[in-house]
Image (spheres, rainbow, N blue to C red):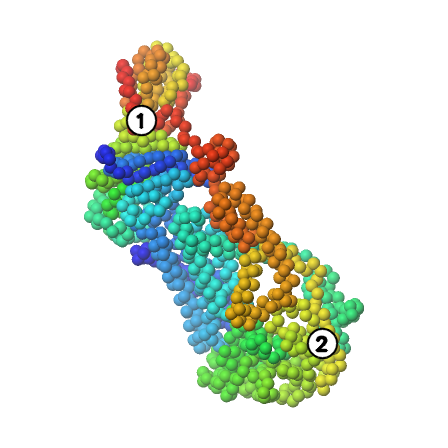
Amino acid sequence: MSDQPGASPVIEIDHLTKFYGTREIVTDMSLTVPRGSIYGFLGRNGMGKTTTIRIFLGFEDPTRGSARVFGLDSRSFPPEARARIGYLPEGHHVYGWMTVKECGQFQASHFPAWNQDIFETVLTHFRLTPKMKAGHLSRGQRAGLCLALTLAPEPELLVLDDPALGLDPVARRSLLQSMLYVTRKADRTIFFSSHLLSDVERVADRIAVLDGGVLQADCTVETFRQQIRHFVLKFREAPPPVPDFPGLLESFRTDRELALTLVNLTPEIKNRLDALGPVSIEPVDLTLEDAFISYVGERGEKTFFMNGKETK
Amino acid sequence: MKAMLWKELQENFKWAVLAMIGLGLAEFYGLTERSNYYDDESATLYKSSFLMSTSFGCAAVGLILGLIQILPEQRRDQWAALLHRPVTRATIFRGKAFAGILLYLVATVPPFLTCIWYTTTPGHFSSPFVPQMVYPGVADICAGAMYYFAALFVGLRRGAWYGTRAFGFLAAVVVSFFVDSEYYSLFRVPVEAAVLMALVLFTAGWGAILTNGTLRDQPWLGRFALVTVIFYGVCGLGAITIIVISMFSIQNYYYGTQYQVDVDGRPLKFISSKNAGTTVMDLSGNIIHDKRFTTGGSYNYLLCFNQVSTYIGDPHQLKDERNGFSRGYRTNQTYVIIADGSYDNEAERWYYLPQERQFVGYYYKTNQRIGAIGQNGFRPGYEPAAPFAGYVPSIYGQIQSIVEFGSTVYHNDFDQRKLTPILSEPGTDVFGATPLRSYQDQTLSLNWGAVALLDKMLIIDKIGSIIATLPYHQNMDRWGNLSVAVKPGKDHFFIQYEPSQWIDYKEQRTMPSYYEEMDAKGTLLNTYTLPPIEEPSGSRSWQEYIAECLLPPAFLFGDIGYEKVGALCGSERLAKELDQTFGDGWGYFKDISIRSSVTSFLLALLTIAWTRRMHFSWKRAWAWAAFVLAFNLAGLITFRLVSDWPVRVKCPQCSRKRPVEENLCPHCGASWPTPVSHGTEIFDLREAAPEAKFAG
């Protein structure tokens, strides 16, 4: 699904900063999520993804800056706005003493636009029956129940915080399929955080990457993959030392090769690579996962064992 | 809210049932446990073990139910899932609170009703039941509800446990002291206090759920409730701290000083202290070296003063409050007084019911009611008896073997099922009557009694014949607390005049007492003035001194304002208290006012300095300073606990600490630096990097 030009943004985060005590969790973050998009929110653990979600949903106050959803300030979210947002927190919490049916009834009593058909469809998808005790469900089934509870009110905005955490591949696939169901209508928006890049690649059309509390990327999946490039430079002898390139994410050397991962490659840098005097420069395609790991992983030159001795 | 109510009831009903069973067992055990104290055993719903189970039990049930309702759901995902519903947070709170209070009532009311049923069913106890006996239990249930709301507040308030959260619990503890006190005569006062604090805690909990932990975003009612709760919590912590410190700081403990008269008729002053033992001196201050008074059994050489009245006349409308000891709503003697004569018959127990003004008797073994004795004589079983005319001014919570109603003195004879009138003084009230004992060893009864009238005291024998008439020679309005002693020869009598009970205790301590020695004809033989017992040197403890310094001026001057308004509205009592404050009590009031005001003023200055240092606006700084000025140190601590305390970090520009919430540094005016760009950022809006094609 692609952006609709001119569509009003669903989520607007403006210079958001969040401190817990004296620890800065999110720094000066600005992000706009357009209506109808499927937004993957990526980052390593503890980088501020959940905090950001909690802030724009109004569960935390920003230290500075602001967050708006549907044009409404997150600090004073009216109940009517919440009815338009489906939120699936990462714990997949259900009340264990309720049956699946009671869970649905309890949720339905709060949401005026409750769609029982959707609820039952998702339950069927996850092989859940109404009489099952929520406390006895497997992790995947619990996730399915939570998703059913989240999707049945037919939210305009679906916010999922690491929804596939701890699920097996089949449950994950079911979750994704159900999740995509919500976007059968063009004006529905999904904003989800995940560590499973293959899932993100499958469904997201835009991603935002948070690293160290700072927004490092906000682009389409395709752009992200294109901007992160991996080259293998082959040499006749030992590769020369790697100069300090701007945009160099990581380098990896063997006795005759130098593998470099770069971001935002420019002609100038390309010339500098040529100047290293390699026999050849081979571009290697990266998956989103490879690109992401290079992007948010440890930067700099890696070590390697060669001929029985440790060499840089 | 209906759905929330249903969910909460379903989720926590099992805990309420469990609490009901636990509390029921504790209360029933407390009610039926055998006591070594006769008066406690007959107290049923006033029994100390039962009241312990209701006061601690209800508080514990309230606290546990509240915490169980909130804490397990407080894990942040779960809490977010709960809050993310198209209803207001206030609705969620109301749903939880109403369900919780219903469950609390389920847990506490049935056990209490069961205990009432057990007590009122004949055959279970050899003591009477009067409806007012449910008061302490009802008060404890109300206080437990307060703990329930305290738990909601503690669970919902964001902050450290040792910080603001725990103070919600402490605020409830403060009111519990009030509820559990035996000094408050009116049942409704502590109940109102508990209900009021429960409402304040409810409001504070509501305010806590509405915001994400800040004070400034709360509605004014929530702010007011939060500040009130924390303030009371701080006061409670202060009181507990002073009590604990006092327990460890008792040094040269002062036992007391008292006046006595020896069997030879000499007034003596006994001074006892931990280190020096007992020193005996005459009224001139000469030390008496008499081994009789320093060895065991010294009381056999001292006359026994029998208290006859606590005041004479009725100028202060305290007729039914002569003895404050027996008027506390939590004191059994307020409603059921053990009749002294019933000791003579081990098989029976007799009680006086002050509200019904009659005596009722029970068989001790079968727990069956014998009957009642009233103005119209004995009535067996549950037949109603007519109340006696007038009140009985009970002393020490026990009915003596002679007892007075109105203008008549009776002798009790429960074996014969009757009260025999032995003295009648038509046209005047009897202000007290008591059997007399000669020495301090109270087993030696004289078979005489003393009767206090308006202008004289009569010494009578068992059948009411007057043995001596002792006229008063002091101002009886102010020295109407009378005791009498009989010398061993039974021909001389000593009346001790002490300040009347209605006089403020502090004033009483400044007033002298008197001994008058008379013969049986009432001839005054000697008068001795007993100076007020001076406080031992250094007796003004540092705890008292500190407490006075830290007293909130708002309370001090608020009290004066209340008295003033009350006096203007025509309250005689408040007008008198106001006169007292600006009359005899002026020196004391002035001292406290100065200490309290100076301390508050200094702390208010400190508050201004502190708030400005923490970059509070001038408006907020002045507001908090005014609060501290009114509420002293407790106000300062409250301010620190409830205000939105700014987090400060080093400014990258000037290296001084600046609040993280402000966009500009208050010192150098710099804004926050934007995150450093490393050239690795990927944003769609940027110019796309040209595609480089490399040869493979």
Q: Is residue B181 left or right of residue A162?
A: right
Q: Position of residue B648 (x, y in %)?
A: 49, 39
Observer-nearest of A149 and B625: B625
* Amino acid type of the residue tagged 2 in the rendering: Tyr
Cα gap from disc 1 to disc 2, whole angstroms: 104 Å
Q: Which residue is mark 1?
A: B686
Frontmost residue, A252 versus A29: A29
Q: Residues within 10 Å of mark 1 (few under 14, many from 20)?
A: few
Query: Which amino acid, mark 1?
Result: Arg
Rendered view: B323 above or below B68: below
Name the quarter where the N terminus of chain B is drawn.
bottom left
* Image position, residue B74 (x, y; %): 39, 48
Q: Is residue B596 above or below residue A198?
A: below
Disc nearest the viewer among 1 and 2: 1
Task: Name the chain letter of the residue that bears numbered label 1.
Answer: B
Residue A121 visible within the image: yes
- Secondary structure of the residue carrying tag 2 is strand
Chain of the residue under the numbered disc 2 shown in the image:
B
- Secondary structure of residue under mark 1: loop
Q: How many marks?
A: 2
Tell me, yes or no, if residue A171 can be seen here: no
Q: For the residue carrying disc 2, how many other residues have a C-alpha within 10 Å: few (<14), some (14-19), or many (20+)?
A: many
Residue B457 pos. (x, y %): 66, 83
Judge from the rendering whether residue B690 lies leftward or rightward of residue B479; answer left or right. Answer: left
**Residue B425 falls in image quadrant:** bottom right
Residue beneath disc 2: B515
Place of residue B73 in the rendered image (x, y in percent of width and height, measured from the top left): 38, 49
> Residue B591 lies in what quarter of the image?
bottom right
Q: Residue at x 27, y 17 (%)?
A: B693
Left or right: residue B580 compared with residue A25: right
